[in-house]
Amino acid sequence: MKIRLNLTVNGEPVDALADDYKTLLEVLREDLGLTGTKHGCELGECGACAVLVDGQPLLSCLLLAVECAGRSVTTVEGLAAGGQLHPLQECFADLGAAQCGYCTPGILMTAKALLDREPHPSRERIREALSGNLCRCTGYAQIIDAVEAAAHANAPERDR
Amino acid sequence: MTTSPRIIGRARRRVDARAKVTGQTRFADDITLPRMVHCRLLRSSQPHARILNIDTARASAIDGVHLVLTGDTFPIPYGILPVSHDEHALCRDKVRFVGDPVAAVVARDEVTAEHAATVIDVTYEPLRTYASPTDSLAHDEPRIHDYGDHGNVHKAVALQFGDVDAAIGGADHVFEDVFFFEGSTHLPIEQHATVALKDPDGKLVVYSSTQTPHYLHRALAKALAMPAAHIRVVATPNGGGFGGKSDPFNHEIVVAKAALLLDRPVKICLTREEVFLCHRGRHPVLMRFRTGVTKDGRIMGLDLQTLLDGGAYGSYGVASTFYTGALQTVTYQIPRYRFRGCRVFTNKPPCGPKRGHGTPQSRFGQEVQLDKIAEHLKIDPAELRLRIVAPPDSVTANYMRVRTIGLAECIRRVVERSAWKDTHGKLPPGRGVGLACSSYLSGAGLPINWNDLPHSGVQLKLDRSGGVTVFCGATEIGQGSDDVLVSIVAEILGVDPFDVRAFTGDTDLTPVDLGSYSSRVTLMMGNAAIQAAQRAREILASAVSARLDVPLDRLVFAERRVFDSERPEHGVTFQEAVCMAEARVGTIGTTGSYTPPRSPARYKGGGVGPTPTYSYTAAVVEVGVDPDTGWITVPRVWIAHDIGRAINPTLARGQVEGSVYMGLGEALMEEQAFRRLPSRLSNALVHKFPSMLEYKSPTSLDMPEIFTDLIEHPDPEGPFGAKEVGQGPLLPIMPAVANAVYDAVGVRIDQIPVTPEKIVRALKAKAAGKPARVGPDAFPDVPWPETLFVTPPSEGGDGRASNEPPKRSRSKPDAGIEATAGVRS
């Protein structure tokens, strides 16, 4: 059965009809065409599908879309603003933090939640915050470097 | 004229970075097309059984089901190696492992397809299950396959280079060790996905997360009995490959057929459990090293035996078998060598190429044995290795050609940076350091389908807009092949990498590149790109030289300009140069090709191991071991890699650190392991834990601090001197961990992974006065075939075996398509 969903996605109101059994991940990718959010297990094991729900990093594969009614969802598509990449995106791009790029959206969103809470986390805190996001390419070092660099970049968005 | 590189060697943002950090890289499962329907596979619940009947009536009757397919639709076998075309898209008469696909359902959505698959009734007649290589060696019948050497032996090989028995017999010391290396899987975060469709012309188009679109193209043509020219394969960027997307897969052929039958797009995306079942990962290998050395540590002879658990299909297995013995000699001087390898079939997901392909297992054995030899001879392990490093520009006993070799420098670098001389054997109990080395191919010297064609092709288009477009069949799997391609073209034409557009991995649009495997792309595609770009540069230079009246050898291509090196202000923009050239000679397009140099190995089996040039690596790993719990921590790793030249050091560092990461996963925790279901169920042999939660892989919290050094001495075979970096740096990690554990707590774990449980077991044995070791005790009797005798080059050999059997005729029906095999059978 399809149900009507009202939620905010990347700052825009969304009014959609979607199957009631679908996860937020499935609605984002299949019904809203936002394929930037990835999946690696659909069981909450890999972190690839992390998005922000009301600012909290959550695994969209473990959330039913109906649970998100009335809430605000931010995906990787909502990270850049005004045609400018987010400092995290700039640093990930410059420092080799994205190799295949498949785990990248989930890691970016998880890192954004961290920096929103703690603008200047230690390397240890970054490692801890990202420990639920698996990456098979990088060995994590360049990812941690990039988050650290973004924290040092004195990002205008966070100062707003 | 030649100037020093502006782009090559500079740490840069990769050209495809923006797409990746904005989530816009389009992976296969991100493709949605009008009228698209979805496919699910029904996989075997039996490890080894005859299929007596498949009843699809109930599934077909479900509303929303468009098509149900079984093996009857797929009579033609295929496989990656021409010598083992042993797979069908769906099983026909029998199943060979739990997870072997037996039927497919195509329906309006995944949920309907999944449900319909569960109501397909398959009647099986169970056959004996082979759970281990010893099972498979002990019983010839029933056979898992009706081909192979004999019984359940897929392939056994025996090669001897010089009188190894005399060499070992004359040695001061003989060391004999048995090791085991457990299998592991690639675990790419992207699950395999494929979308197939019939294009408006009626031709087949397949988008797939494949590392090898060219080989998939060939397999589709064969399995579907279609002209290859009517099939287009597009390799979507892979969300991690590591070798796991290098075979043509069942699901790719199934959805291709379904799209043709239904005339609408069909998509499949595997579940994580199915990714574990597709596997093609690291072979579990049991190995025995018998090594004779002089009292100062020089190797006189090595006698190596390996036994590979191949799983249920051939895959790359014949090549994997040879790889367990091919590269021992290119790292250290081994004047006489015997290698015997045997791969058996078992009823498990097939093994194949995982990062390092067949070489990490015996690299582990060799490097741990060297640590034991050094200790026995009271020589520092680093010093021992420095004494025996293979010489540059030499040919080994098994006819592998070594070009540049920076191994000694790698060893010295990690010894210095890790303060090895102050730490090895000198840290307090529970802390230790271990050292190991490795080498790897910069691309397989021979193609999988033996022919005289180039291994990589590049086309270049320049037009009056000043735009440069480069086309190459190479496949972007995260390693940065698009960036390497574009940066080489940009360097030679004097433009910015972001000015160049790349089209890659598309069999309609791009010339063939054999694929992203064997660390071949940078070297082979890079050399082809240099040729194409230089040809374009010559066309432009001729036009500019004539127009500006500047001698050709004074023209510089840089900063989007072409100008006189003696009067830099005298020049034209790059776009003007293109227009001048186009006006002069017409449309500008150039090509480049690369074929590796011929190997001196002429014996049967000598096709596995040659490469244009080998990379080298040395690593020191520091561990902490809790003597009560056996818990292992790895705080620091120092690694130096002889890369020849780093095209983009940011990406090169990422490859080294990613290799350290994957090596630590294999060393400490990753196991592709199996168990029996309880007998009240089926007693079937199943994957122990096909989930990312229980198949442990390192997280960001498990990773050590990594000190990476790139050793750069350009190799004449490589583009701008570059060698491989994607695989070699993984190889020393596992033995270095085992050697470090010995340094920390004095026990030998001769078995990968090195787990706390094994350490505790070894410590208990040590306390009880037994050998302080955990590992296999014996190597079983293997019915080795007749040994091929090859005289080493140092003893006057010509690369041929003295007792080579006559070559088999090429009278197979598909000989015209397949030519002969890269691995001759």
Image (tube, rainbow, N blue to C red):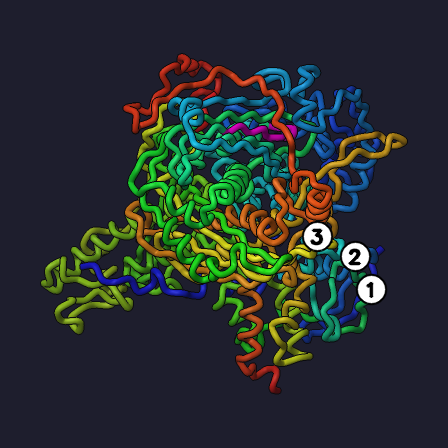
In the drawing, does residue B143 fall left or right of residue B460?
Answer: right
In the drawing, does residue B374 fall left or right of residue A13?
Answer: left
3 or 2: mark nearer the eye: 3
Location of residue B4 (image quadrant): bottom left
Q: Which residue is mark 3?
A: B630
Q: Which residue is mark 1?
A: A66
> Distance from label 3 to label 2 (Cα)?
44 Å
User: Considering the image in quadrants, where does the N terminus of chain B appear?
Assistant: bottom left
Graded by Cα atoms within 10 Å as few (under 14), some (14 to 19) or many (20 or more), the crowding at tag 3 reads many
Q: Which residues are magenta?
A: B304-313
Mark 3 and mark 1, same subunit? no
Q: Does label 1 or label 2 sit earlier along the sequence?
A: 2
3 or 1: mark nearer the eye: 3
Q: Position of residue B633 (x, y in %)?
A: 64, 58
In this orientation, which residue lies closer to the viewer: A101 or B498? A101
Q: Which residue is mark 2?
A: A22
Q: Secondary structure at mark 2?
A: loop
Which chain does the residue under circle 1 lie in? A
